[in-house]
Image (cartoon, rainbow, N blue to C red):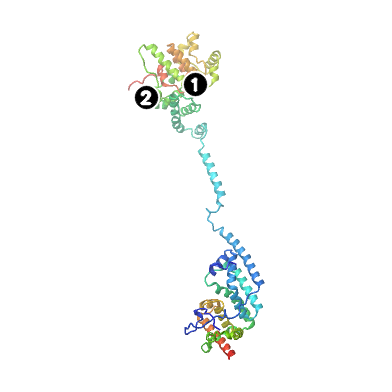
Amino acid sequence: VNLTDTRSDEALMLAFRAGEAAAFDVLYQRHRTWLYNTLCRQLQDRSKADDVFQETWLSLVRSATRYEPKAKFSSWLYLLARQRLVDQWRQINPDIESSTFNTDAHEAEQPDLVAALADESADPMRQLERQQMIAQLESAISLLPTLQREALLLAEYADLSLEEIASATGTSRETVKSRLRYARGKLAQMLVGVNK
Amino acid sequence: VKLPNNGPEHLPPDGSTDRPVGLKNTLPSLQPPGWLDEHILSVAHQQARMNAQVRSSTNKPKKSWLSSNSWVPWAGSLASAAVVLLLVTAQPLPPEAPARQTVDEAPAMPTAPATTAPTTTAPASTESATTRPAPTASAPTRSASASDSEPPVEAAKRAPTTGTKPAPPSRAAATSPPARAKAESAQPQASSPSVLATPSVPSAPSPPSVDAIDSANTAREFAKSAPPRGAAGVRQSTENQSSENQSAESKSYPSPTGAADAITAPNNERRAAVTPRTESVGQCAQQLDELLLASRKREAQQLFRRCAERFPEHIWPPVLRQRLELVEPKPPD
């Protein structure tokens, strides 16, 4: 895989649509990690994450001939993955949409995860505590509401902007911003509670 | 834990930038299994090949008809068909075809071949008189066909326009059969200024001898310009020639009225002298030359009339007619 390919994701996708297999290799290497981590933390199940991950990429391969660079490639990729994710979510919790929207009402009352992380010291002596905190963080993320977790993971792993997350999840920018705020507050609350 | 900043979107609402963020660098990175990577990549490569094939197949119809090679076969066949059609239409018809068509389809309109024939025969005869090439067989034939469709009166009227010395129709033309009239009508067409400029220069007086010499020279020149039709005719013996000519004369060439007394004279030599010995125009001219050299002008006139009657398709030079006193100057109006 040519990792030094400086072409954009959209250009690589167009090249793959034109029949260049190497372009897909570069795209896959760029986006496989964040997508897989996002799916794993969304579903909390590696096997299900593998299935969604595979179906997502195969769906991208099959729909490559219809690809048009209208949005960021990572947004489009996650949009494909989210169609499978929603199916998995509905199998787990049929009321996922309503429960998620209910959390928006408590946006102002939730503490900020970033603020909680900022309080952590970089002292090497606390490396062990850091490892423990990472495990707690993983657990806290898993406890987040689905759509808040989705927004948080897309923002943290996929480096998507609010507009791109909104485009990938089919919501508005303000909704994404609210979900992120709720997710971070809950994480901070959980982590502070653990630390205390 | 101090986490790196991941971007402005992850900043807190108050705008402060001194807080590290980034779960990506904090949480352990999970990797998909290798078999999943291989499977996805293999499927993607296969799809890429299919996309390439689809693109190559869909790009072909988008080519313009000029850049594609599909138009070459039918364009080539069309061009070849056009060339064949041009060749067929541009190929000249055989000389007999227009005359037959005119006679068969439009007998009342013989003007078309009559107008075209003189234009083709006159330069050829002029050239033959000046440069003296061998006369072709087609030129006399065309002139004869032209005179067939043209009345002798019209040809006689048209004669002064081509020659510098107009003359009324000769006695031979008035008394000879239609074949002679044809020859007479064809003769002025060939009389061009270049032909008239060729006669010998009049020299010192002694009228009989000079006249005979001039006439002999003219006949000699004409004999050169009109070679025999075939070498076999030249090589024929005189005995055979005379016998053949006598039989031919008695059968198909009756004597004109103007030469009746000369022919009816009981003189075998004279009779042999005025009879064309061969069927060759060149030998006729040679015989005329001999008679003119011997100052036997009357016999030469008779011989010329017979020759003109025998070879009506041949173009006899007007100079020779003048020397033989067959052409009289046109009386002034």
Q: In this view, does B203 lie to the left or right of B5?
A: left
Instruction: Determine the residue positioned at 36% across, 15% down.
Output: B203
Look at discs 1 and 2 and give the one toward the viewer: 1
Q: Earlier in the sequence, mark 1 or mark 2?
A: 2
Image quadrant in which you'd find residue A187? bottom right
Image mark for residue A15: none
* Amino acid carrying mark 1 in the image: Pro
Q: Residues within 10 Å of mark 2 (few under 14, many from 20)?
A: few
Q: Report the residue marked by disc 1.
A: B227
Local secondary structure at mark 1: loop
Asked if both marks, 1 and 2, belong to the same chain, the answer given is yes
Q: Residues within 10 Å of mark 1 (few under 14, many from 20)?
A: some
Alpha-carbon distance for marks 1 and 2? 26 Å
- In this rendering, does residue B258 appear at all? no
From this view, report whether residue B11 is shown above or below residue B64.
below
If the image is split into quadrants, where does the C terminus of chain B sit? top left
Along the line of sight, the residue nearer the viewer: B152 or B69: B69
Q: Report the residue marked by disc 2.
A: B164
Q: Which residue lies furthest to the left in this view?
A: B333
